[in-house]
Image: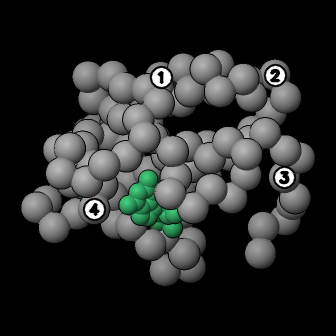
Amino acid sequence: MSDCLFCKIVAGEIPATVVAESDSSLAFYDIAPQAPVHVLVIPKEHFASVNDVTDANEYVFDNLMSLVRTVVVDEGIKDSGYRLVFNTGEHGQQTVPHLHAHVLGGRKLTWPPG
Ligand code: 5GP
Ligand code: ZN
């Protein structure tokens, strides 16, 4: 997807502060952090949202979660706790149409979300 922001980050065409990487996934700091730790974990392959992952390509979540596990250890939030968020579609207020997990932590987060 040549016009996709996160595909451009994967391609190195837009800079990002990468914190972890695997063959299939990339983790980098969110440009507008909402918590002391705010990392985005994305598949390198383009999927528009959670809705594009089906039984046929569930490996995408396996690979993504593998990198999330690395990130929460490296960022020191595994034991204190954290939140994983997949904003999806209009009601989910998704703004970048490339599948991504927000990893939020480093403070006690409020619930419910707005
Ligand atoms: P969404 O709103 O789709 O769930 O999340 C998109 C996230 O991407 C937002 O938290 C936003 O701050 C972040 N973001 C948007 N543009 C950039 C960028 O160019 N670089 C980085 N690192 N994060 C971005
Ligand atoms: Zn993309």
Residue type at numbered disc 4:
Leu
Whether residue 75 is visible to the viewer of this picture, yes or no, is yes
Q: Which residue is mark 4?
A: 5
Mark before the other along the chain sequence, 2 or 1: 1
Mark before the other along the chain sequence, 2 or 3: 2
Asked if residue 24 is positioned above or below residue 103 in the image, the reply reads: above
- As drawn, is 86 to the left or to the right of 50? right
Q: Which residue is mark 1?
A: 66
The alpha-carbon separation of the residues under discs 2 and 3 comes to 14 Å
Q: Which residue is mark 2?
A: 79
Asked if residue 86 is positioned above or below residue 114 in the image, the reply reads: above
Mark 4 surroundings: few (<14), some (14-19) or many (≥20) residues within 10 A: some
Choose mark 2 or mark 4, whichever is in front: 4
The alpha-carbon separation of the residues under discs 4 and 3 comes to 27 Å
Q: Which residue is mark 3?
A: 109
Q: Can you give x and y, in whole percent of width and height, for residue 59 in the image? A: 33, 30
Residue beneath the point at 62% across and 56% down: 33
